[in-house]
Amino acid sequence: MRVVIAEDGAMMREGLARLLADRGHSVVAAVGTAEDLLAAVAGLADPADAAIVDIRMPPTHTDEGLRAALDLRRDHPGVGVLVFSQYVETRYATQLLAAGSGGVGYLLKERVANVAEFVDALTRVGTGGTALDPEVVAHLLRASRHSEGLADLTARERQVLALMAEGRSNAGIGEALSITPGVVEKHVASIFGKLDLPPSDADNRRVLAVLRYLQPR
Amino acid sequence: MAGMGIARQLLRAPFTVGAVRELAFCLCGVVAGVLDFAVPGVVFGSAYGLATLTGAGRGSAVEPAVTPAALGGVAVALVAMALLAPPIGRALSALHRRLAARLLSIAVDPPTARRPGLRAILSDGPGWRGVAYSLLKLPLSIPQIYAVVCFVGGVVNLSYPLWWGLFRNPPEGVRLSPVPVVTPLGVFDVETYAGTFAAFAAGAAMLLVAPWVAHAAATLDGAVIRRLLAPGSMTQRVRHLEQSRTQVLDDAAATLRRLERDIHDGAQIRLATVALNLGMAAEKLGDSGQPRDLDQARELLALAASGAKDALADLRDLVHGIHPPVLDNGLPDALATLANTSVIPVSLRVDVPVRPAPAIETMAYFCTTELLANATKHSRASHVTVDLVGDGDRLRLHVCDDGVGGADPARGTGLSGLAQRISAADGHLSIASPAGGPTRISVDLPYQP
């Protein structure tokens, strides 16, 4: 994959670049501001597959990274955007998802400690899927306006829903919960039934459906 | 040269904007002063009249003044005056404040709104002070009238030679009565054209004197206005407290924001990087058996270790900035630590037999930190003395250096921010820092905030 990194912490930026290079990905640009990010993505002759974007960057250190991420999704839909933050901000996550077409992710920075999972999430985002931090999903579930619908779910179904919301495939969910894909499929169908959602095969579409359903007021 | 300057100033004085404004103030003051007496007079008169008319039909002008009806009328009028005086006093003082603000550029804060209720009317300090000012306005307006007379009379007297020829051409044999010339020193008569030049000279003198009289009169009046029409000391205290409360709240919010930012950009990102390096090291070591790449794993672990150390150092600095642990032992220990770590040599003397409130200790500590940092950054001093004396009532901190001076709270936010925070604790910051040095900064704090 061809990856652009936008992160203002130099150590973190270098670490990420090294990690990705180690894993055989090529880092085509590593920048420290949102402005440079947009310029770098626009300037690439051979487009990038994914961008890792820190939310808080100079000059205001507020949400310029997120705004740049939204711009990227609009102007370069081929580039998946993985937003990278130290905080769980469900509002940012829902703003990203509201764009609707997948290719987005929101991870806490500490997730880099598990290199395999991190690279896996980035790959999902780069190929048009989604990746949401478990913390973000938990917050979204808590803030859900359909808690009465969720109340009908069994504990297992909630686990499946949460993993689904993170962007995992049925196989991934089965692996995480140590159950067979067939069982996962049954749970998913049951969840859709209880939440009144029409089933669909594409991973990211069902995540979006779930998340739209879960969107906090 | 200086004499020329003074002469020019004397000649120009009547025509400056300030002089015209002061004259206008005198004129308005005279009018307002008349109003000050007319209003209570009308109130008293109408209350008295109303009371005598309705109270007893017998009350009439020809009877002796002291009749029961008249006495009742006086009583009713006095009560009406007592009730109406404070609100009228407030209204009139608002008028006077506006005049002073517009014409003398004397900005006096209005008093706070009156509380409702009858008692509040009778005990309305600002209202009664307004009444007192109205009474004082009579003597105050005497020099003001004088100034107006000087100015108007001066202009009139100056014009004598101009119109003399037009109106003073009597036929042969007719003798016109002399024309009086009014001056502050008296009246004299003019009979001939040549005499009009005496009037002209008197007019010129009056015109030159008028602005100085007006200035003196306005200055005196302004001083009285500041004294009587400003909010009472309690109100000012409340205002000060309100301001400093806002200041403290803003300060607290800013501190929290800065803290969040420092943690986010410091320890937090360092620890995330440590996690990243550890994750990569784990990759290099593999899940089991022979490590995949031992050298890289070692390097990544070393990176992680130094990152963790940096994060700890960041947190230590942060904690120190919030509350230095050594301050728990009191100011002598805390300041000694501070003095030992200062770049410029510090002579420290601490004499605080009684410990002040913790908030005051913290404030004194951070004042010292900031003043020492300022001295290090700007003064180019070779030596600083820090002197802290507490007597159980006030805590006094003096930080003096032998540097280049020129410390000015107007430039840069450091000193003015410090002054505001000190003022919020009812303390006071004073700065003596002439260009060329030395700089002597004193902080005076109460023992209890």
Image (tube, coloured by chain):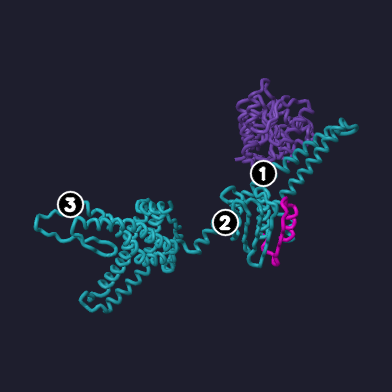
Chain colours: A purple, B cyan
Disc 3 marks which residue? B165
Subunit under mark 2: B
Residue A136 screen position, x and y as percent:
68, 39
Q: Looking at the picture, which amino acid does disc 2 mark?
A: Arg
Residue B86 screen position, x and y as percent:
39, 65
- The quadrant of the picture occupied by the C terminus of chain B is bottom right
User: Are the residues flagged by discs 3 and 2 in contact, CB closer than 8 Å?
Assistant: no
Q: Residue at x 73, y 48 (%)?
A: B317
Residue B14 screen position, x and y as percent:
35, 53
Q: Label 3, label 2: how many angstroms apart (C-alpha)?
A: 73 Å
Res. B261 mark? 1
Judge from the rendering whether residue B407 lies leftward or rightward of residue B321; answer left or right: left
Judge from the rendering whether residue A83 lies leftward or rightward of residue B63; answer left or right: right
**What is the span of residues highlighted in magenta in the rendered image?**
B331-358
Confirm whether the magenta stretch covers residue B335.
yes
Most foreground residue, B87 or A183: B87
Category of crowding for the residue at label 1, using alpha-carbon neighbours closer than 10 angstroms: few (below 14), some (14–19), many (at least 20): few
Label 2 element class = helix
Q: Label 3, label 1: how many angstroms apart (C-alpha)?
A: 86 Å
Nearer the observer, disc 3 or disc 1? 3
In the figure, A90 relative to B57: above or below?
above
Most foreground residue, B122 or B104: B104
- Please report whichever mark, 1 or 2, sits nearer to the chain's N-terminal start: 2
Q: Looking at the picture, which amino acid does disc 1 mark?
A: Arg
On the same chain: label 3 and label 1? yes
Disc 2 marks which residue? B245
**Residue B250 is at least partly visible in this image:** no
Judge from the rendering whether residue B52 lies leftward or rightward of residue A67; answer left or right: left
Q: Looking at the picture, which amino acid does disc 3 mark?
A: Gly
